[in-house]
Image (spheres, rainbow, N blue to C red):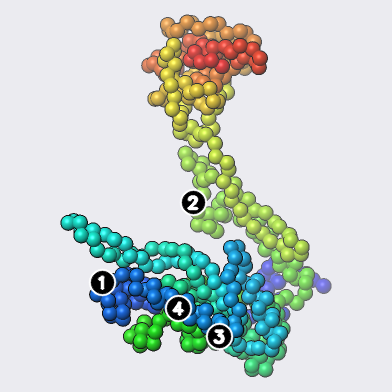
């Protein structure tokens, strides 16, 4: 037996069943005229007959709608569920659906749930004219209000839910599953198939099932909405609907499914392994920028923070390839983007600017931060040079400083310990902020004294007179 070696070979030679269908769809249900403040004012004027526009009269409609929803549940013996915080609504639905199907029922309301969620709504606020006279003003805002979830089973669409907001303008959401619709249509047409929880695993006539999936369109979805709006409590009266305040529908989110069933398990393993192997480089910055549309900068003053990597995860027998980016923990940095702290000896001038407030050291005129380990410099840029060895005798370690211009008196350092002062960032030498300090030919003026070991008295830095 010859095994496929590429994804293309698997998909071209080892697919036994293939089906493309609309999967889940999440749709907006709304009254177009009531999605802005002027539409609400017109509704209050024309439908409610009130001269002053305000959201206060709408509270009566909210109370009536909520009461009718409770009466509907009590009259038909429909369970009422108050969702707890963090509770999965789909898990509750599956419990009621199992009992519903066990009773042999094919259509009806499973239960009505209530949950508080944030949504857009209108409020009235008081404003004042220039002369101090107040007037009401309607604004659109957001609020945490009750929502009613109506979980039901339709004879054509199967399980679905319709969620109503309990506040004006009473927008709703409709969630359907195209696979469930196609399964019920295939069963009605007498086509044998093996159903999955959310799709088809096999079909006696794949072409006929594909033709059924292709038929699902806006007319079917709109008919489902009108059918159940007529059965459920409605927030708007018949007079409102006759005046044109009727629900419309639009797509909020749509998922489309391509089901491909392979002929052998080994073909599936080859498929996943090849897909993972082909995408192992997707965690690299240049590939991440292609996938996520980000501009990845590895160099320059503002590089993109974080790590970019690809991980191969195998849970049971299902492999997965994930791409992650992470942001490193924050740390103090200089204006050039390098971490603050004592710098190692260097033979080239280096300029650093402190991001924190610095105080001035009176003896040497340099700026020094409190002893926190962070770097410091003067309020302007300060340049420091480490000791340079004589040209005739190069040496890897710094040599004693040569005589230079007049500077504050500094004690000679012990021969055994040259170190970096954590306050003035000098390494073996420092100079005050002066024009002479930026000259490459100016020799260093003093050396830093060693840090005191634990348990011994502190010593004084000769460069900035700070205690270490």
Along the line of sight, which residue is nearer the eye, 112 or 331? 112
Residue at position x 68%, y 84% in the image:
101
Q: Which residue is nearer to you in this view: 206 or 417?
A: 417
Crowd around label 4: few <14 · some 14–19 · many ≥20 (10 Å):
some
Q: CA distance from mark 3 to mark 1?
A: 38 Å
Question: Comparing marks 4 and 3, which lies closer to the viewer?
Answer: 3
* Residue 71 x %, y %: 52, 82
**Element marked by disc 3:** helix
Quarter of the image for residue 127 reads bottom left
Examine the rendering and report whether any part of residue 450 can be seen: no
Closer to the N terminus: mark 1 or mark 4? 1
Given contact means CB atoms under 8 Å apart, are the residues at marks 3 and 1 in contact? no
> Which class describes the residues within 10 Å of circle 3: few (<14), some (14-19), or many (20+)?
few
Q: Mark 1, mark 2: which one is toward the viewer? A: 1
Q: Which residue is mark 3?
A: 75
| SS label for mark 2 | loop
| Residue identifier under label 1 | 52
Q: Which residue is mark 2?
A: 295
Q: Earlier in the sequence, mark 1 or mark 2?
A: 1
Q: Is residue 239 left or right of residue 72?
A: left
For label 1, count other residues whose C-alpha is less than 10 Å away and answer few (under 14), some (14-19) or many (20+): few
Can you give x and y, in whole percent of width and height, for residue 63 in the image? 43, 75
Disc 1 and disc 4: Cα gap in Å? 23 Å
Tell which residue pokes out farthest to the right in this image. 1
């Amino acid at each position: 037996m010859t095994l496929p070696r590429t994804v293309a070979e698997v998909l071209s030679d080892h697919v036994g069943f293939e089906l493309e269908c609309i999967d889940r769809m999440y749709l907006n249900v709304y009254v177009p005229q009531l999605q802005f403040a002027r539409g609400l004012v017109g509704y209050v004027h024309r439908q409610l007959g009130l001269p002053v526009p305000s959201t206060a009269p709408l509270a009566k409609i909210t109370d009536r709608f909520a009461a009718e929803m409770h009466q509907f549940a009590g009259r038909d013996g429909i369970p009422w569920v108050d969702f707890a915080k963090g509770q999965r609504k789909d898990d509750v639905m599956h419990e009621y659906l199992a009992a519903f199907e066990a009773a042999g029922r094919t259509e009806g309301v499973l239960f009505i749930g209530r949950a508080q969620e944030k949504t857009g709504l209108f409020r009235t606020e008081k404003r004042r004219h220039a002369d101090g006279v107040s007037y009401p003003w309607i604004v659109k805002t957001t609020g945490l209000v009750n929502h009613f979830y109506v979980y039901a089973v339709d004879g054509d669409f199967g399980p679905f839910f319709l969620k109503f907001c309990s506040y004006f303008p009473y927008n709703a959401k409709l969630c359907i599953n195209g696979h469930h619709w196609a399964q019920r249509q295939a069963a009605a047409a007498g086509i044998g198939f093996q159903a999955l929880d959310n799709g088809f695993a096999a079909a006696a006539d794949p072409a006929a099932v594909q033709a059924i999936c292709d038929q699902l369109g806006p007319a079917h979805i709109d008919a489902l909405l009108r059918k159940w709006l007529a059965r459920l409590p409605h927030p708007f009266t018949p007079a409102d609907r006759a005046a044109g305040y009727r629900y419309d529908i639009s797509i909020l989110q749509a998922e489309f499914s391509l089901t491909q069933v392979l002929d052998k398990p080994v073909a599936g393993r080859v498929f996943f392994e090849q897909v993972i192997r082909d995408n192992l480089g997707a965690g690299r910055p240049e590939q991440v920028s292609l996938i996520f549309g980000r501009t990845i900068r590895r160099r320059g003053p503002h590089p993109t923070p974080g790590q970019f990597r690809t991980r191969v995860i195998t849970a049971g027998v299902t492999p997965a390839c994930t791409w992650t980016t992470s942001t490193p923990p924050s740390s103090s940095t200089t204006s050039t983007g390098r971490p603050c702290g004592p710098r190692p000896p260097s033979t080239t001038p280096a300029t650093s600017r402190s991001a924190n407030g610095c105080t001035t050291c009176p003896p040497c005129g340099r700026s020094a931060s409190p002893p926190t380990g962070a770097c410091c410099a003067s309020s302007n840029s300060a340049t420091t040079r480490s000791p340079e060895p004589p040209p005739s005798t190069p040496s890897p370690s710094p040599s004693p400083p040569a005589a230079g211009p007049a500077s504050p008196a500094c004690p000679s350092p012990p021969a055994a310990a040259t170190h970096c002062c954590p306050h003035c960032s000098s390494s073996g030498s420092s100079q005050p902020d002066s024009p002479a300090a930026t000259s490459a030919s100016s020799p260093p003026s003093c050396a830093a004294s060693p840090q005191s070991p634990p348990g011994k008295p502190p010593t004084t830095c000769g460069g900035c007179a700070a205690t270490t």
